[in-house]
Image (cartoon, helix red, strand yellow):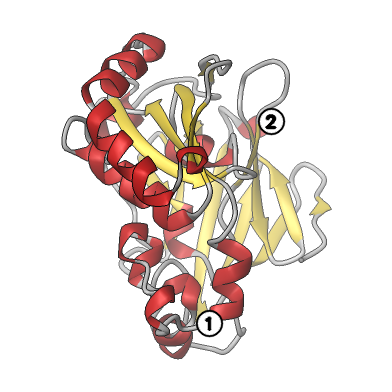
Amino acid sequence: MDQLILTEPGERVSGQLRKLEIRLPASGTADYRLRASEQHLALNAKLGQRIRLHHTGAIHCVHCGRATRKSFGQGYCYPCFSTLAQCDLCLVRPETCHYFKGTCREPEWGERHCFRPHLVYLANASGLKVGITRGTNTPTRWLDQGAIQALPILEVDTRQQSGLVETLFKSRVSDRTNWRAMLKGEVEPLDLMAERDRLLGALAPDLAALRERFGEGAIRPIDDARPLAIDYPVLEWPRKIVSFNFDKTPLVEGTLMGLKGQYLILDRGVINLRKFAGYRIDVDAA
């Protein structure tokens, strides 16, 4: 893992982009750091100040480091994207796991990452949604999505099982975030516990069938969980969403008005930095 070096105000940060590092301190307001190779920049302190991001034209795979003309799957070169298990379709659709067919791209990687407890959760980023994540990946998963509320509702033994459970829920609730609504701050709080009870009741027969298939203890309710509330550092929500893209606009600059999900909200538009992992950039901040 790269060693992160905190920069002083006004200094330039240069290197390969990684997704924004987001932490949730006791205050409940997300704390952001921009990461570029071995450097990082504390962003909350830059709210209301000018920031300039310049893509130099170089892109390097976040896995193997080779130079690539085009990035695949948020930061991979094509050889890695087409061979790594972490880039396979089953990572997006876990219910399609093909490990037991003997066709997993990297069986040992799958055993380490997919055969471990996962959570099924409800979140509110642009309205009610269902999602899944490894049990050790909270609250990071919710912060990355820009959720203002989140509630784990079930724990399962494997990633495949989490995908099968999520598929049941998708018949009644979305698994996607409307990123434009999320960035406009047009999100009203929900009673996630009431939604949990409603959905678990409606899906009880289907969940019972999965428990019969995998074992009674394989899909466990999380009865003692309480909703997590998350605030984001935003001075002003954009009225109109204009999205920047380093492939089309190598220079992105403006006043930093907010941070939510993996987005920088500038006075002139927004940019999803996770999309450009592996891009080499120079960042100048006031």
Q: Which residue is mark 2?
A: 45
Please state, as top left, top right, bottom left or bottom right, where the C terminus lies in the image: top right
The residue under the point 35% across, 31% down is 183
* Residue 120 on image: x %, y %: 43, 37
Q: Residue furthest left?
A: 171
Closer to the N terminus: mark 2 or mark 1? 2
146 versus 193 height, above or below: below
Would you identify the image quadrant in which residue 115 lies?
bottom right
Q: Is residue 80 left or right of residue 164?
A: right
Rendering coords of residue 222 (x, y %):
53, 24
The answer for how far apart the CA atoms under marks 2 and 1 are is 42 Å
Say what secondary structure mark 1 lies in: loop
* Three-letter amino acid code at the position of disc 2: Ala
Q: Please tell me which residue lies in front, 95 or 218.
A: 218
Q: Nearer the viewer, residue 36 or 85?
A: 85
Count every numbered label the image shows and give the total: 2
Pinpoint residue 25: horizontal percent, then vertical percent: 72, 24
**Which residue type does callout 1 highlight?**
Glu
Q: Is residue 201 above or below residue 267?
A: above
For label 2, count other residues whose C-alpha is less than 10 Å away and answer few (under 14), some (14-19) or many (20+). some
- Residue at the spot of label 1: 106
Q: Nearer the viewer, mark 2 or mark 1?
A: 1
Instruction: Work out which quarter of the rendered image holds the N terminus and state it.
Output: bottom right
**Residue 69 visible here:** no
Relative to 88, 235 lies left or right? right
Q: Nearer the viewer, residue 169 or 282?
A: 169
Query: Horizontal placement of 132 versus 188: left or right?
Result: right
- For image coordinates 33% across by 30% down, the residue present is 182
Residue depicted at 54% across the width and 80% down the height: 107
